[in-house]
Image: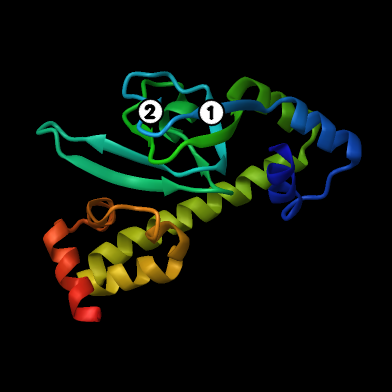
Amino acid sequence: MKSKILSHVLEIIDLTKNQQDEFLSILNEKTVTKKSFLVKPGDIVTEEFYVVEGCLVAYYLDELGNKHILQFAVEDWWISDFESFFNQVPAKLYIEAIEDCKLLGINKEVLEVLYQRIPQFERFFRIKTTKAFVSLRCRILSTLQKSAKERYLEFCKDYPDIEKRLANYQIANYLGLKPESLSRIRKELV
């Protein structure tokens, strides 16, 4: 399980064997069964999670009870309620397993110590955070500038493996569409 995250990390930073071993020793293995929650609103999130296996969804419920999907996470991706994780405030998101999941968690306090002991990890997580920020910005601009059909095609191109693992209503929600609209778009494309 831990070899996947090590490969993921070594794509970005170089580590000695001792540094690799130290990093692997701080990871917490976690399993989450389908339809179970990793995080719920009100939790104080102390870990961020690397997905070894499975698929999760992060969403919030508005005051009317409507679900708004913010993120999907599959193998080789990171997920958490990052506002809660970084600021130690109550979570606002639900993070739910769409499939049975195997995760590796990193505790915030342990991560801070790791930054001191192995500074390359600050670079690793800065790069991951920057990529996530840019991706979020692109998603916002896509929502503002592109048609529903263009957004769907972009989603399929950018995330072909995810698209096959999700229900129609989940993709529609993520794209800010009604399921009927997504069905219409799919019919047009056939």
Count residues near mark 2 (Cα–Cα under 10 Å), then give few for <14, some for 14-19, many for 20+.
some
Name the colouring of the figure.
rainbow
Please state if 78 lies on the left or on the right of 156 as rendered.
right
Expressed as whole percent of the image width and height from the top left, the position of residue 103 reads 57, 34
Q: Say which mark, if any, is on residue 36.
A: 2
Expressed as whole percent of the image width and height from the top left, the position of residue 171 reads 28, 56
Q: Quadrant of residue 12?
A: bottom right
Residue drawn at x 73%, y 29% as measured from the top left: 114
Q: Would residue 116 be visible to someone looking at this image?
A: no
Residue drawn at x 54%, y 47% as measured from the top left: 77
User: Which residue is tagged 1?
Assistant: 31
In 3D space, how far apart are the residues under numbered discs 1 and 2 (Cα atoms)?
Answer: 10 Å
Q: Would residue 22 be visible to someone looking at this image?
A: yes
Label 2 is placed on what type of residue?
Ser
The secondary element bearing badge 2 is classed as: loop
Query: Which quadrant is home to the C terminus?
Result: bottom left
Question: From what the image shows, is residue 157 above or below residue 4?
Answer: below
